[in-house]
Amino acid sequence: MLKAVIFDFDGVISDSEPCHFAAANEVLKDFGAQISKEEYYAEYLGFTDYELFEAVRDKSKADYKDVSIDRLVEKKAAAFEKLIKQIDHLIDGVPELIEQLKNNKIKVAINSGACLADIKIMLAGSSIEKSFDVIVSADDVERGKPDPQGYLMAIEKLNVVFDSMIQAGQCVVIEDSRWGIISAKKAGMKVIAVTNSYPADELNEADLVVDSVRQLKIGDLQKLCSA
């Protein structure tokens, strides 16, 4: 029985990845490093900001001098906030799907590699700002996707908040990347992938692949948990 739906954030709820990409490069340019768009989507999508700056340093031998990675993350967050406020980034169909879930008393959570401050900025003033029962962000986990820690933590938090016993098999995850799909699968959850960031043939490890969350009805999610 379906008890909870856990959403990835960037690329599923918010079309914010272009801003994350631009903000990361804005920080990196001070150290003579840059990431190509192809490289970002192929290698770094789903990384926490900390993991991204670590990986770029290790791969390109970028010299951050005496600047800590924590400070780079702060600088990237400031650049991201400026950029995201300039665009309409909420993905079409998400508010309607969340309304369906709420009407059917399904718990709704987020598990994102973004920091909580970024998530709050993007939700502020939107119709879904208060919709999520639990949010797990990069600030909460030691290991980002494809590790299952974030999804397992989301269930734990839901069970604490509602004094419930939701199991992994009663949860459906909505993701947009292979890293996210692997993470949710390792946690024992069913996964729906949306082709917002990658083509369908790169998401075939999911239980269901759709082009838009507008295609989803509550019955589709319930069937996954009854299989």
Image: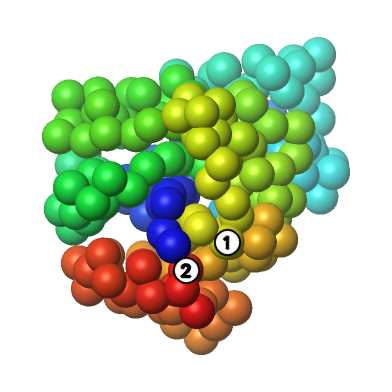
Q: Pointer 1: what residue?
A: 169
Looking at the picture, how far across and down is residue 184, in whole percent? 61, 58
Helix, strand or loop status at disc 1: helix
The residue depicted at 47 percent of the width and 68 percent of the height is 225
The residue depicted at 23 percent of the width and 69 percent of the height is 217
Q: Are marks 2 and 1 in contact (CB under 8 Å)?
A: yes
Kind of residue sitting beneath label 2: Cys
Give the left or right position of residue 10, taking residue 136 as reference: left
Helix, strand or loop status at disc 2: helix
Q: Nearer the viewer, residue 224 or 162?
A: 162
Q: Pointer 2: what residue?
A: 225
CA gap between label 2 and label 1 equals 6 Å
The residue depicted at 36 percent of the width and 24 percent of the height is 120
Looking at the picture, how far across and down is residue 102, in whole percent? 23, 44
Q: Nearer the viewer, residue 216 or 143?
A: 216
Give the left or right position of residue 63, taking residue 23 as reference: right
